[in-house]
Each structure stands twice: as C-alpha cells, then as structure tokens.
Image (spheres, coloured by chain):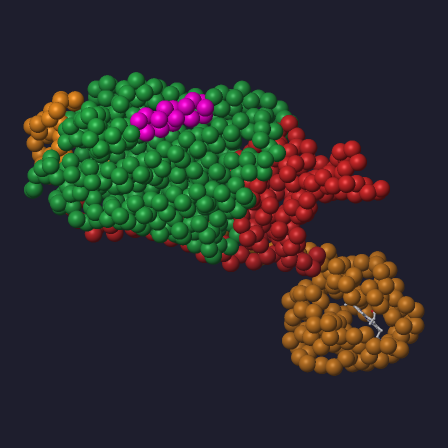
Chain colours: A orange, B red, C green
C-alpha cells in the first residue's frame, strides 16, 4: 500500500472518487507485495473466526434444547422427556363418577333401596372384571340381587358405545375409582383389560344378570 | 467483489436465511400449538378472553402500557419473577395462542401483569389505581369523566368533586375488564413434564 | 479504467442539491422533535405525573412517538440522503431519478407525520419499531421505492465495474429495508402469525432494522470518509468483504437474544446469543479497516464525528455480546440497560457516523463552506457530552434497577428511588442532545440560506466544491 500515492490529510490533493475505487481494487488484487507482518494477519483472523464459531457451536449444542419446541428451559434434557401425560385414574374416575353415576348410585355409593343398587360393598363391583365392564359397556336389565337386596325395577343404562359413549379409558378409570371408594378395596381395572373385554363382546344389547352370572 | 449479481444474491440470501430460520421456523414449530384440554375441568386452556377484555386490550395497547409492564413470567431461578408472585410457573408459548397481538413488553418499570387478574380484587381497585396513579405509575385521569352526581352516587365513582362525581369512561371499564381477565392457567402437563426439572446447573457451570 | 473528471463530480453534487437538501431538512426537523419527545419521556421515567393528564403525551405514547420519529423521521431521511449521495459519487455520474426522489421524500414524510398523529391519538400497534398503524406502512413502502430509485440507478449505471465497500453496504441497506419492512408488515400487522411467533418476528425485525439497514448506511459513510479524510486507502482492505458478509449473515440472527428466558423454545434465544457472539468478527474487521481514522487530523470535524461513531460502534458491539449471555441478561433484561444500548447504537454509532457524512457532504452539495466553525465545535461537544451522559446514566440506572428487581423484597417504589438520580442525569443528557440538535439545525439552515443567496447572485464566499 505504501507504493500508492497517499496525500497528507487536509491537502488539496486528497483521493478523488476515481482514485479511491482504483486504489482499493488494487489493494485487493495484489496482496503479494506486502511485508511479512501482513501475512500473519489472515491467520490471526482465521483463528479468531474459528474460535468464535467453535465457542458458538459448543454453546448452541449445550443450550439449544435440541431445537425441541417443548423445551423452554435450555438446561432440560431431552431424554427425560415424557409427554404422554397420564392422569391419575382415581382422580379422573371420581370426576367421571360425579358427572354421571352419582345421579342414581348416590354420592355415598349406597344407591336407593329398591331402585338403584349400592356400589359400596357390592359383590358385583368387587367381583369379576368381566361382568362389571360388560355392565358399563352395554347396560343391565333384569332382576338382580345385590348384598341380599333385590333390584330390577329400572334398568342400568349403557355407558359405553351404545349409551353415554364413554371411551374405554374412562370406563377403566371410573371402575378403578369405585373399586377403591365407599370402603371397597379391590384392585384397579386397567384400560387394557377394558379394551380386551370390549373387543370380545363386540356389539351387544343390555345384559341380563343371568348372562353375566355365567361368566367367570 | 465485481460481480453485482452475486452481491445481490448474497444480500438477499442473508436475510432470507434468518427469516426462514427464525420467523418461519418458529412459526412452523409453534403456529399449530393447540389449547390443552383438561379432562378433569372439562375445559380447554388457555381460555379465550371475553369480548369486553379484548376491547380492553386495545386500550392497553394504544396507551402503551407495554412500555413499562411485561407480560411474561420467567422461570423460577431465572430472575425473581416467581418470588415476586407474578406467577407460579414460567410463561409458555401455549399461553399466547389466543392473543391477537402479543405484547410481551419492553421494560419492568412496573410489575409483570401476566397474572394481575388474580391479584386485583375488583374493577374498583383498577379504577382507583388508574385515577390516582402511584409514586411510580402515572395517573390516567383522561380515562375518567366528571358528571353530576345523583342522590345516590354511582357505585363506580372514584372521587367526588363537590356535588359532581368522577366515574370511569367506557374505555376505563373495558381496560379494567382486560386487566381482571389476565391470569394464566395452572400448568400444562406437556410443558411441565419437560421443563419443571430444574437441575441446579447454570450457564458456565457445565462440565 | 475510466478516470472520472472532477467536472462530472461537481455536476453530480450540485444537481442533487435540492432533493438531498430536502431530505436533510426533513431529517433535522424530525431530529429536533425526537429530541423534545425523548426529554419528555425520560422525565416521565422519574416523575410519572409529568404531562400525565394529557392523553396524547402519556408515557406509553411519548415512548412510541420518540422511537418512531427517531427511526423513521431522522435516521431514515438522513440515511437516504447520505446513501444516495455516496452511491452517486461512486457511480461517477449525476444522480438520476431526482423527480421521483423528491416525490418520494414528500410522501415518506407526510406518511410519517400521519403515522405519528395516529400514534398520539391511540392507534399505535404496540410492536416496537413498528408502532405506526398498519395502513400507514404501505404508503411508506411505496414512497421508499421512489426514494431508493436514484440509488439503484446510480449503482446499476456505475461507470466502473470495480466496487468499493461503501457501495456494498449502501446497496445492502437499500435492498434489505423493503424486504425486511414488508415481511414484518405482513407477519405482524397484515396477517399476524399466531401467538408467540409474533414476538419472534418483532425482535427479528427490530434488530435487523438497526443491523441490516441503519448500520450498513453508517458504515458505508465511514468506509468512504475514512480514506477521504486521511488521504490513505483503507488498511487491510482485502478483509473488508469478510466483515461485510459477517454482518449480513450473522447479524441477521442476533435479535432473538432479547427473548432469553421468555416463552419461546430455548433454541430461539440461544441462536441469537450465538449470533451476537460470532458477529464480533465483523467488529474486529471494521476496527482493523477503519482504525486509521483514530490517528487522523483531529481538526477535521467530519473525522472527529466518524472517530467517535466508530468507537461507539465497537464498544456497542462488545457490550451487546457480553450482555447477551444469560448470566448478565438475567440482570439487565427489562431494565433501562437495553435502552442505553439502543441509545449507544442509534446516537453514539449511527448518528455520529452519519453526521460525519453530513458535515462532509453539505458543503459539497451547496457549494459553500459551513458558515461557522464555532457552531460546529459546539455541536460536536454537545453531542459527545449528551451521548456520554445519557448512555452512562441510563446504563447505570438499568444496572441498579436490574439488581434491585432480582431482590424480591424490594418494592417498585424503592427501585424507583434508587434509580432516580441516574434518570435525572439521563434527562440532562437528553436535554444536552436536544440542544446539540438545535445548534445543528440552526447551522444547517444558515448554510442553506447562504446557499440560497449565492444562487441568486449574492457574493457569499464560494467554496471549491470540487475539492475532492
């Protein structure tokens, strides 16, 4: 660059626009005629740039949350992610019970003598899953004995596909709830079990108690 | 650089890349975000603001409240947002899906308003605040009007001026409705599952 | 290689005199108005009751107004004037399309004035840097097309195939603005993207308005003025392209750093932080290229403006990078600190660099020297003092406020009390800046008046317009 005429600042012969363009084009074109110190600079800049990129890349890798749209806290680890959120069937089941069953079987689960059978301590509820799942899926009609009392003046409506149209997970949840509420202590009814029984029965009208009692 | 076309293409590409990556990329990820349907409550969250509140939001927007108030809670441990009781959890993208204009806000000269609806008791509180202002917040007297008081002063009146009462204008009323409607739903299981785990690791402390 | 004669040059300067003077007059008018509103809105920060009863001047609106006036009034108009003048000079021919330019200028400024009235009346959009209502922006976009035409013509019709850094930066600014502006209009106001995506687009737009539009114009001016004023070619000029592309490709991603800790997926702010870091490479090259100006002749006023602007620009870049990191952002986010950073960028870097160009070009388009060197020195000192006081005190106010906010036990009244002294100082700084703008405006009108007289045959002292 030193070979380029460089008038002193303030002098009347400073760079014209044409010279400006020309001189700078020259500066890019011939890099060879410069001194040794000059050659170090590209290396230093390359080093700076790679350093920034490396640091930036590392930072991105650590704190990008793997570009996952659900990760807001950049320190969250993707492999701990479990978004298949399951609701507690007892909480959910209670909700469901209160939305429907409560009308007939009462908040206490004791039912109404002569009309609606009790669920508290019922041998049906605490008995075979095969039966109660069927009752809920398709309903129940016919005389029935629960805890030594007779019922059957009104039928039990279907809650599954033919009636309230509840899905299998809802049926599983409400049964799980009832089987541990009102003093009952039976185990949960899994969704898989309900699905399995549902598949076995296919389409069916209300069950009669005799039919159900034949089941295991 | 003698090639004008190359220069032009490069210039164009530089912005196009960032536009694609940030504007389109974020929209592709978040544009389809659905409300979370809570089976227990039998409601979807976040809920849509009632009409009167969305009119109030326009007042909030045109007075530039966002110059001094934010509407985003930062996560526990990052800033003092949760300690200041501005919210129990950080704000997520899902919180904003129903908002026609997102006003995150520029600064916190005043408190965050994400959950202000839960803190304010009634519209009267809002009127008093707006009419009198505080040491740190201007008053907005132009949102109120003076009118002759009847035998029974209006329950909305914030002050009396002789036998005249000062009552909120419709603009103040919708603004109050908006502020009272501001409250974020409890939490979303999907976001909570991923983000609630807060290992005590900070930037720079890794490895 | 055609050597451009000085005759052609002087012609290019005088023919564009009126349109460019019009842009500068408009710019200065807005600068003063922006100064007044900045003073008001800063007073309101420590004394909230100030003008609170006037709905037009409630703090939210003065804040939106001063920001809009500064960007779309002052920065845009003066940027247009400087960019066009530079492209004209380096194109080696008189600017063409001046009729369009004048019409565009008139409509741009009418549009801005209309937009401001709308904001004051309560039509603000609430989107930072895009506060004017949706129906004003298309008008500005059309006016912009007319204003940019002479620049594009000068670029495509340039006499030399070789191009200079000034031209890259100026052309980039001219092309990127409409691209950025229309994308933001559509995605934020026309057919807004859903939910939080708006916040992402808003910061992308706001940052790029600065990094890809205003700053390139200022750098175009700096790359032109430095060799002109020092009489030497740009040092290590062969790296200039790297600096240019680094700004464009990495600078475009830096905006989202502001969303750190916000309701957006973590990768979005992280990308912004990383880009803010990598863009430091651009600053290194700019420093390398333009360092000559710092040891130039300090008596030259344009050179002093450029020196200050360059230093402010470099410091601003480093500060942006440091305070992008979460550890610091946690403190300064949502405080006065980002305002200080913005002030440093808009006034310290942009205005200083562009004023260097204005001091250089005004005598060349009017053919007259600036009437008073005293006024120039006064303006420079007021600007330096005003900028330093405003930026430092806003920065300190923000730092204090940020730490106070972290302590959940401190009330907002206590925070306001602790920041008050700094905000009073910032108000003083804003007032000094306003005074500086007034001095410049008066001086510029004196120059125009003298030029007007000389046009009509008076004996005003003529300067050799073709000196360079």
Which image quarter holds the N terminus of chain C?
top left
A135 vs C204, left or right, is right
C47 vs C178, left or right, is right
| Camera-side residue of C301 and A55 | C301
Tell me the residue at 36%/37% (across/down): C26
Is residue C430 in the magenta section? Answer: yes
Q: Position of residue C91 (x, y in %)?
A: 17, 43
Which image quarter holds the C terminus of chain C?
top left
B150 vs C373, left or right, is right
Tell me the residue at 55%/38% (across/down): C56
Let me know if residue C341 appears in the view: no
Is residue C282 in the magenta section? Answer: no
| Camera-side residue of C290 and C309 | C309
Residue A24, picture quadrant: top left
Q: Position of residue C208 (x, y in %)?
A: 37, 43
Magenta region, residue range: C429-446
Let me know if residue C23 appears in the view: yes
| Camera-side residue of C188 and C137 | C137
Q: Position of residue B2 (x, y in %)?
A: 15, 46
Tell me the residue at 69%/55% (across/down): A88
Figure check: C224 above or below C107: above
Q: Position of residue C101 (x, y in %)?
A: 28, 46
């Amino acid at each position: 660059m030193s070979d380029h005429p460089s008038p002193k600042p303030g002098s009347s012969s400073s760079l014209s626009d044409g010279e400006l363009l020309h001189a700078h084009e020259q500066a890019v074109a011939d890099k060879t005629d410069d001194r040794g110190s000059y050659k170090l600079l590209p290396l230093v800049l390359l080093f700076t740039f790679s350093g920034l990129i490396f640091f930036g890349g590392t930072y991105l890798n650590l704190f990008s949350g793997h570009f996952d749209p659900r990760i807001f806290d950049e320190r969250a680890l993707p492999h701990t992610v479990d978004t298949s959120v399951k609701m507690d069937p007892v909480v959910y089941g209670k909700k469901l019970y209160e939305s429907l069953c409560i009308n007939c079987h009462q908040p206490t689960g004791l039912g109404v003598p002569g009309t609606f059978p009790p669920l508290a301590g019922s041998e049906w509820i605490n008995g075979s899953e095969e039966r109660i799942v069927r009752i809920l899926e398709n309903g129940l009609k016919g005389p029935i004995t629960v805890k030594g009392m007779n019922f059957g003046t009104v039928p039990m409506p279907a809650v599954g596909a033919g009636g309230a149209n509840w899905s299998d997970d809802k049926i599983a949840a409400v049964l799980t709830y009832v089987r541990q509420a009102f003093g009952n202590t039976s185990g949960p009814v899994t969704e898989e079990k309900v699905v399995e029984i549902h598949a076995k029965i296919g389409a069916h009208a209300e069950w009669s108690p005799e039919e159900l009692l034949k089941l295991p | 650089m003698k090639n004008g076309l190359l220069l032009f293409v490069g210039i164009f590409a530089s912005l196009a890349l960032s536009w694609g990556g940030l504007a389109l990329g974020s929209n592709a990820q978040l544009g389809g975000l659905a409300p979370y349907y809570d089976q227990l409550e039998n409601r979807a969250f976040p809920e849509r603001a009632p009409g009167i509140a969305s009119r109030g939001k326009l007042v909030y927007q045109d007075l530039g409240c966002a110059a001094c108030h934010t509407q985003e809670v930062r996560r526990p441990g990052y800033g003092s947002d949760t300690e200041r009781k501005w919210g129990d959890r950080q704000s997520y993208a899902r919180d904003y899906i129903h908002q026609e204009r997102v006003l995150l806000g520029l600064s916190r000269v005043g408190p965050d308003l994400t959950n202000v609806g839960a803190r304010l008791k009634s519209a009267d509180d809002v009127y008093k605040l707006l009419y009198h202002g505080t040491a740190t917040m201007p008053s907005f007297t132009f949102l109120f009007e003076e009118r002759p008081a009847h035998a029974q002063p209006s329950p909305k009146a914030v002050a009396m001026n002789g036998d005249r009462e000062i009552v909120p204008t419709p603009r103040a009323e919708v603004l109050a409705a908006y502020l009272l409607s501001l409250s974020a739903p409890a939490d979303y299981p999907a976001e909570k599952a991923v983000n609630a785990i807060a290992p005590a690791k900070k930037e720079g402390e890794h490895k | 290689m055609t050597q451009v004669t000085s005759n052609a040059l002087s012609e290019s300067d005088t023919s564009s005199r009126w349109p460019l003077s019009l842009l500068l007059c408009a710019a200065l008018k807005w600068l003063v108005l922006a100064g007044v509103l900045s003073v008001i809105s800063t007073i309101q920060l420590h004394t909230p009751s100030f003008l609170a009863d006037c709905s037009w001047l409630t703090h939210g609106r003065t804040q939106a107004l001063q920001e809009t006036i500064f960007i779309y009034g002052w920065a845009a108009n003066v940027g247009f004037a400087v960019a066009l003048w530079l492209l004209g000079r380096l194109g080696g021919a008189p600017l063409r399309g001046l009729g369009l330019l004048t019409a565009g200028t008139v409509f741009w400024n009418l549009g801005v004035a209309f937009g401001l009235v709308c904001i004051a009346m309560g039509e603000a959009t609430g989107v930072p840097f895009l506060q004017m209502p949706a129906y004003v922006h298309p008008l500005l976009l059309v006016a912009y097309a007319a204003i940019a035409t002479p620049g594009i013509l000068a670029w495509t019709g340039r006499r030399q195939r070789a191009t200079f850094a000034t031209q890259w930066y100026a052309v980039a600014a001219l092309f990127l603005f409409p691209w950025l502006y229309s994308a933001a209009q559509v995605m934020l106001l026309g057919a807004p993207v859903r939910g939080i995506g708006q916040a992402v687009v808003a910061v992308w737009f706001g940052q790029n308005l600065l990094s890809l539009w205003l700053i390139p114009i200022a750098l175009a001016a700096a790359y032109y003025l430095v060799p002109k004023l020092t009489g030497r070619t740009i040092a290590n000029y062969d790296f200039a392209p790297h600096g240019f592309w680094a700004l464009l490709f990495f600078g475009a991603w830096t905006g989202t750093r502001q969303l750190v800790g916000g309701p957006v997926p973590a990768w979005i702010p992280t990308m912004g932080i990383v880009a803010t870091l990598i863009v430091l490479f651009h600053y290194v090259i700019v420093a390398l290229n333009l360092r000559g100006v710092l040891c130039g002749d300090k008596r030259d006023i344009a050179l002093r403006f450029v020196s200050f602007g360059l230093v402010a620009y470099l410091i601003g870049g480093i500060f942006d990078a440091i305070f992008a990191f979460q550890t610091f952002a946690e403190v300064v986010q949502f405080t006065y600190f980002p305002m200080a950073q913005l002030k440093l960028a808009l006034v310290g870097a942009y205005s200083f660099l562009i004023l260097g160009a204005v001091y250089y070009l005004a005598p060349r388009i009017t053919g007259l020297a600036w009437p008073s060197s005293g006024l120039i020195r006064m303006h420079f000192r007021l600007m330096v003092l005003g900028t330093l006081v405003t930026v430092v005190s806003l920065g300190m106010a923000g730092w204090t406020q940020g730490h106070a906010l972290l302590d959940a036990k401190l009330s907002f009244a206590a925070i306001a009390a602790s920041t008050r002294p700094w905000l009073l100082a910032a108000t003083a700084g804003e007032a000094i800046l306003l005074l500086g703008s007034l001095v410049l405006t008066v001086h510029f009108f004196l120059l125009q008046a003298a030029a007007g007289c000389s046009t009509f045959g008076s004996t005003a002292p003529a300067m050799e317009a073709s000196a360079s």
